[in-house]
Each structure stands twice: as C-alpha cells, then as structure tokens.
Image (tube, helix red, strand yellow):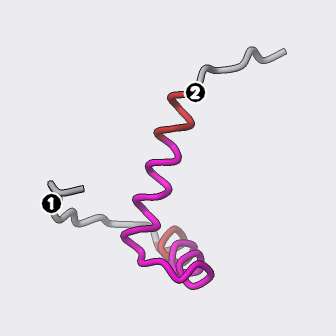
Amino acid sequence: MTDRKPLQLRLPTNVKAWLEAETAKTGASMNSEVVRIILAEIDRRALPQTAKA
C-alpha cells in the first residue's frame, strides 16, 4: 500500500477493548489488525454466496 491517508476512527468502547485484546494476542498494531479484518471481510463478500436451505 503506497497511497496511505490517515483516518480518524471512532470506536465504541467495547469494540476498542476487543481490538486491543486481539492485538495483545497477535502482537499486531491496531492499524494492521483493522486492515486485516477489513480485507478478510472484503474477501468473504467476494465469495459466491451458498444457497441457504
């Protein structure tokens, strides 16, 4: 990623606490964890949806 722009993000307290716990487990920065989660969601949404019975 070469075109990076700062983004101020307001998170609910419980979401920030969860994110901090996740980063403590993985050793990742909060920024990289947020990017990882967003990219995973983009990939998930790009997959063909399976038929629900």
Residue on which the image places disc 1: 5
- Taking 48 as reference, is 7 above or below it? below
Sequence order check, earlier mark of 2 and 1:
1
Which of the image's four quarters has the C terminus? top right
Span of residues in magenta: 18-41
Residue 28 in magenta?
Answer: yes
Residue 28, position as x, y percentages in the image:
48, 77
Q: Is 33 on the left-hand or right-hand side of 3?
A: right
Residue 27, position as x, y percentages in the image:
53, 83
Residue 53 in magenta?
Answer: no
Q: Give the prevailing secondary structure in the magenta stretch.
A: helix
SS under mark 1: loop
Q: Is residue 30 or residue 3 the one in the foreground?
A: 3
Residue 21 location, quadrant: bottom right
Q: Are marks 2 and 1 in contact (CB under 8 Å)?
A: no
Residue on which the image places disc 2: 47
Which of the image's four quarters has the N terminus? bottom left
Report the residue at 15% width, 54% height from top.
3
